[in-house]
Image: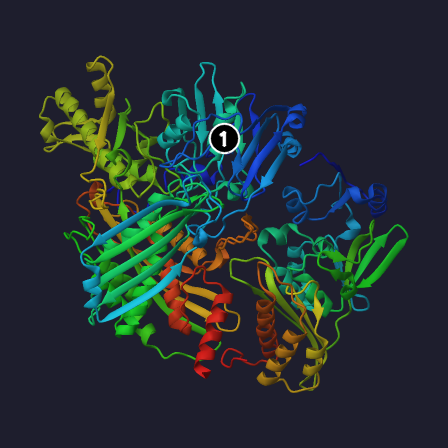
């Protein structure tokens, strides 16, 4: 008999098809008569489109359609701010904005046709520096000014608290934009079928949000669109609702009577991808001598690029999420989101948390040193705990942050490494750490955060799970299969999770805010419990006993005394026959008991909160400025780990992505144009650039989560940058406050130290 | 990508005739790692591609004590790295080839293609200059030999005349006591293109260095021989101080490139550190304790 379906390292249920090359991604799909689309992008950061001549492109043999901003719906789409047309109309606002599109019989013909489109631009002065965006007289990105959003939060009495502080420290931190770097560039296949419905297969984190956005952007009824999720090769936030190519592909399909596929090359994907929101953060913090944080003042300037998208929500997270990690009562925060004539920025794994985590944890390490305290003790002293309510009214359920701190400090040998004598050599080592929190779920748009599972148990006793929550590679389907198997009492191998499809799947928000395990998982528990009750009732009727006496374990129904037993398949068939053909088809819905933010950003938005800590050792080459990550230990508090293998995979992946952000990746712009928009020059971490990774789990029990689980491993991307920056400081005494940590900055910092020591 | 004719000559003569016939319109395809990228990024759009893959004369790696090493221009980096005769006689070249770029490039890219592309951010040129390599170049009027140092003209520019094909790389026979060292510096471990590399060859005589070549690559438009620094190392007992002094001279004499991957000042700094280390290591000294 199978032991528990949860809590054991288990390969993802879709791993096999992926490694065999059998998984089908959107770019693999073909329909009879399929055409191919290619996009023409703006070469200017800011320009008026004077004229577009598509006649030569249209005349090219094999071209089926050419579209420009003049052809697209008048209605603008967007998240909060409705700002975008399907193709640029009148004005281009960033280099790479889609100005025209070609549909042709082959990708090559489409490509060639792009060269035949003549666009006349009147170049306008661009606004490229967010720091200048609010100055008088600068170019305006949109009517109504360059300020997209501003939030202000005021808690307690900040001035009085600062007056009572023994130590006040203020610093400005800058963070940069990161490419999500998923393995699968965006790809979409779309067709208008004979009945006039628009069918779209696209790489997305949410089929229902995708459908809603297509309805808006193409100005057509929601139910006239069907979105189906093929296998998705990673999203990291970039495939929620901001990428543009799926919208353009679906629009192009409405122009022709054949299916259209738009698969982006890597270069194209970088130009149209959704990079993370860069933020400049001024942080001022007051502490008493014993390390208690008494006051905090924060000023954030974040850059959303040309269109707001989700960047406002991202900035809100930067502004206030980390406040909830600590017992602090006096906070004053101003955060402003501004437009620039650069690529739109938005959602990215961690959703704004990484930016503030860098600032906060760098600050904590600096102040700990000033107070002569160990930074881990400082975190411990201020850490919020289970059962507490945070300054923004977040109700903390499970919280294993102190255990995470213990785990990483023990694993890396914190005390010993911190106290070792500083060597004066060329290669110097140091250790650093950081801690962070994240949500598991987030009640936002529509004031709900629920999830529904439809569960079908077939006549052979095997189950099919229908969900609108997506697996983008992170393991959602495996998690659902495990919870289903565990709760229902069948082997995991007997569970199939059907791909999200807006026609057949229950309505769901999709994969974001680490909400799928906790909310989708709870819906799964409920659905499986109901199916089990239905099955046991049928079994009781057939076997002539009480349902309460029966149990379903590993696909077999048994009474407690062993007198009655039946294979599950027999009972499933019995149910169908005795109910006039009605199979076992149940629904489980779960909406957590959370609230939306009120107007003052207060309220318990998530059913649970996840925590993580990371400790790293670096080696700094003082002659070349190169920083090498020697080792990293990351501890994730995810409640009960449904699948430890998946948690470790996600945690290690997050740590690598944080490493890339901190040391390796940096966008270079020239006049608003990205000059290193390829993976040779925009260098993400490769296998040989990654040190020994240690991922660890602190298992708690989350009462609001399915079988004790909560969101895993999105928290894991948050501490990396500050842990590395703190380790660099420990190694060489140079405090880097602007990311990424480049060799040049290290060398400049060392030169400054040298100068200061000579002065 | 526009349509192109893909030609597969079966002999060197046929290949040379094709290049003569099609002139500027033709591009030569060796391993394709650079050419295909350039075509995909639409930086190059040749109407004719002449693929050399079928030319057996351009393959093979052989060594004789009289003539030295001959590496066919179509040899892949991984073949050079694995070749026993290279590992035995020119271990430094095998080491360079084994660490070049990434496995995909090593298994597909050719040494000839690498040299003809003229991209400075790569490893082979500096070590080949330091090993006194000569290039064998075929043209319609016959074959000529060019010293490696003269082959490199400027940033993405070589001495290859239109219509010519690089056929082989020759290295002189190994002489007793001659050794080679090589170091590449990547800006970060995630980079596959060096920001600087240093090749050092020398002959040891009685504990002193003679016939020293110190060549810098990747940080410069073309591999640059550091004559003054090499002279400083010649006939002297190598100490950490001398290593630092040679490094200082090399950095001073450097003609650095300056781009998004490294400013001139940064390249100079990296070259200085790398030269100091390669000299120290070659002399069996530990550079890690004493900063220059």
Q: What colouring style does the render use? A: rainbow
Residue A43 position by quadrant: top right
Mark 1 Cα shell of 10 Å, populated few (<14), some (14-19), many (≥20): many
Q: Kindly tell me whether residue A637 is visible in this rendering.
A: no
- Mark 1 — residue? A248
Residue A249 lies, in percent from the top left, at 50, 29
In the foreground, A659 or A747: A747
Disc 1 chain ID: A
Residue A181 lies, in percent from the top left, at 47, 47
- Left or right side of A652 for A643: left
Give the position of the N terminus of chain A as an image quadrant. top left
What residue occupies the far top of the structure in this picture? A580
Residue A2 position by quadrant: top left
Residue A570 lies, in percent from the top left, at 23, 22
Give the position of the C terminus of chain A as an image quadrant. bottom left
In the foreground, A185 or A479: A185
Residue A285 position by quadrant: bottom left
């Amino acid at each position: 008999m199978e032991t528990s379906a949860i809590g054991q390292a288990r390969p993802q249920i879709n791993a096999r098809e992926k490694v065999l090359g059998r998984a089908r991604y959107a770019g693999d799909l073909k329909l009879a008569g399929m055409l191919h689309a290619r996009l023409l992008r703006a070469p200017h950061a800011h320009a008026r489109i004077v004229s577009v001549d598509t006649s030569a492109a249209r005349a090219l043999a094999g071209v089926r359609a050419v579209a420009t901003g003049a052809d697209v719906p008048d209605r603008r789409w967007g998240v909060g701010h409705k700002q975008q047309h399907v193709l640029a109309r009148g004005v281009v606002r960033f280099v790479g904005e889609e100005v025209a599109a070609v549909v042709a019989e082959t990708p090559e013909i489409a490509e060639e046709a792009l060269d035949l489109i003549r666009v006349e631009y009147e170049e306008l002065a661009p606004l490229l520096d967010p720091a200048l965006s609010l100055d008088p007289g600068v170019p305006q990105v949109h009517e109504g000014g360059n300020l997209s959003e501003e939030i202000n939060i005021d808690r307690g009495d900040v001035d009085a608290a600062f007056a009572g502080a023994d130590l006040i420290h203020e610093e400005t931190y800058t963070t940069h934009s990161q490419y999500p770097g998923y393995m699968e560039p965006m790809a979409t296949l779309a067709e208008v079928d004979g009945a006039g419905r628009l069918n779209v297969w696209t790489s997305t984190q949410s089929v229902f949000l995708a459908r809603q956005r297509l309805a808006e952007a193409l100005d057509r009824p929601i139910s006239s669109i069907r979105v189906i999720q093929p296998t998705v090769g990673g999203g990291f936030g970039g495939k929620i609702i901001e990428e543009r190519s799926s919208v353009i592909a679906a629009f192009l399909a409405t122009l022709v009577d054949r299916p259209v596929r738009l698969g982006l090359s890597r270069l194209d994907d970088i130009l149209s991808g959704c990079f993370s929101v860069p933020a400049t953060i001024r942080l001022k913090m007051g502490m008493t001598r014993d390390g208690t944080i008494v006051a905090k003042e924060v000023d954030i300037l974040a850059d959303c690029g040309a269109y707001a998208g989700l960047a406002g929500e991202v900035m809100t997270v930067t502004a206030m999420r980390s406040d909830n990690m600590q017992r602090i009562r006096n906070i004053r925060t101003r955060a402003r989101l501004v437009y620039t004539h650069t690529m739109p920025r938005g959602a990215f794994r961690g959703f704004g948390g990484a930016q503030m985590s860098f600032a906060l944890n760098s600050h904590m390490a600096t102040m700990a040193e000033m107070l002569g305290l160990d930074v881990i003790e400082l975190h411990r002293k201020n850490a919020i705990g289970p059962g507490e309510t945070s300054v923004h009214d977040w109700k903390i359920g499970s919280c294993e942050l102190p255990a995470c701190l213990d785990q990483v400090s023990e694993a890396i040998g914190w005390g010993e490494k911190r106290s070792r004598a500083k060597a004066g050599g060329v290669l110097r080592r140091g250790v650093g750490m950081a801690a962070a929190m994240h949500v598991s779920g987030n009640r936002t748009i529509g004031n709900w955060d629920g999830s529904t599972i439809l569960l079908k148990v077939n006549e052979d006793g095997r189950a099919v799970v229908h969900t609108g929550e997506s697996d983008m590679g992170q393991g959602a389907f495996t998690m659902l299969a495990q919870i289903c198997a565990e709760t229902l009492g069948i082997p995991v191998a007997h569970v199939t999770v059907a791909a999200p499809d807006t026609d057949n799947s229950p309505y769901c928000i999709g994969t974001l805010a680490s909400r799928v395990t906790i909310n989708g998982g709870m819906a799964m528990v409920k659905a499986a419990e109901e199916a089990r009750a239905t099955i046991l009732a049928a079994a009781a009727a057939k076997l002539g006993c009480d349902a309460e006496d029966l149990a379903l374990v590993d696909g077999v129904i048994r009474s407690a005394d062993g007198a009655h037993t039946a294979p599950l398949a027999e009972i499933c068939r019995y149910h169908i026959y005795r109910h006039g053909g009605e199979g076992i088809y149940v629904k489980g819905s779960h909406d957590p008991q959370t609230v939306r933010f009120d107007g003052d950003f207060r309220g318990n938005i998530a059913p649970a909160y996840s925590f993580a800590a990371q400790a790293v050792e670096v080696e700094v080459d003082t002659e070349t400025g190169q920083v090498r990550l020697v080792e990293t230990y990351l501890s994730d508090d995810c409640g009960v780990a449904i699948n430890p293998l998946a948690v470790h995979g996600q945690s290690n992946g997050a740590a690598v992505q944080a490493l890339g952000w901190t040391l390796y990746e940096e966008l270079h712009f020239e006049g608003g144009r990205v000059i290193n928009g390829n993976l040779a020059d925009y260098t993400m971490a490769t296998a040989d650039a990654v040190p020994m990774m240690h991922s660890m789990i602190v298992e708690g029990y989350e009462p609001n989560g399915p079988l004790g689980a909560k969101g895993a491993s999105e928290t894991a991307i948050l501490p990396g940058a500050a842990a590395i920056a703190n380790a660099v400081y420990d190694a060489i005494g140079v405090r880097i406050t602007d990311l990424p940590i480049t060799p040049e900055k290290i060398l400049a910092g060392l030169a400054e130290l040298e100068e200061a020591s000579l002065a | 990508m526009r349509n192109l004719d893909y030609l597969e000559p079966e002999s060197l003569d046929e290949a040379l005739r094709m290049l003569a016939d099609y002139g500027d319109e033709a591009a030569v395809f060796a391993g394709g790692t650079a050419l295909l990228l350039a075509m995909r990024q639409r930086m190059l759009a040749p109407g004719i591609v002449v693929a050399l893959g079928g030319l057996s004369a351009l393959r093979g790696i052989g060594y004789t004590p009289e003539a030295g090493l001959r590496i066919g221009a179509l040899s892949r980096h991984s073949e050079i790295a694995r070749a026993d005769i290279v590992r035995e006689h020119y271990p430094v070249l095998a080491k360079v080839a084994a660490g070049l770029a990434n496995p995909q490039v090593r298994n597909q890219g050719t040494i000839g293609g690498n040299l003809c592309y003229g991209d400075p951010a790569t490893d082979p040129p500096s070590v080949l200059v330091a090993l006194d390599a000569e290039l064998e170049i075929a043209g319609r009027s016959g074959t000529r030999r060019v010293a490696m140092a003269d082959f490199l003209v400027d940033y993405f520019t070589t001495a290859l005349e239109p219509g010519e094909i690089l056929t082989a790389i020759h290295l002189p026979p190994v002489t007793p006591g001659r050794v080679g060292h090589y170091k590449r510096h990547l800006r970060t471990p995630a980079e596959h293109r060096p920001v600087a590399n240093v090749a050092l060859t020398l002959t040891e005589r009685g504990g002193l260095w003679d016939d020293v070549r110190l060549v810098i690559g990747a940080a410069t438009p073309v591999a640059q021989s550091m004559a003054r620094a090499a002279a400083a190392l010649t006939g002297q007992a190598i100490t950490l101080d001398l290593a630092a002094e040679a490094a200082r001279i090399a950095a001073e004499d450097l003609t650095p490139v300056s781009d998004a991957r490294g400013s001139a000042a940064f390249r100079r700094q990296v070259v200085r550190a790398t030269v100091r280390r390669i000299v120290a290591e070659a002399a069996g000294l530990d550079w890690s304790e004493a900063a220059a």
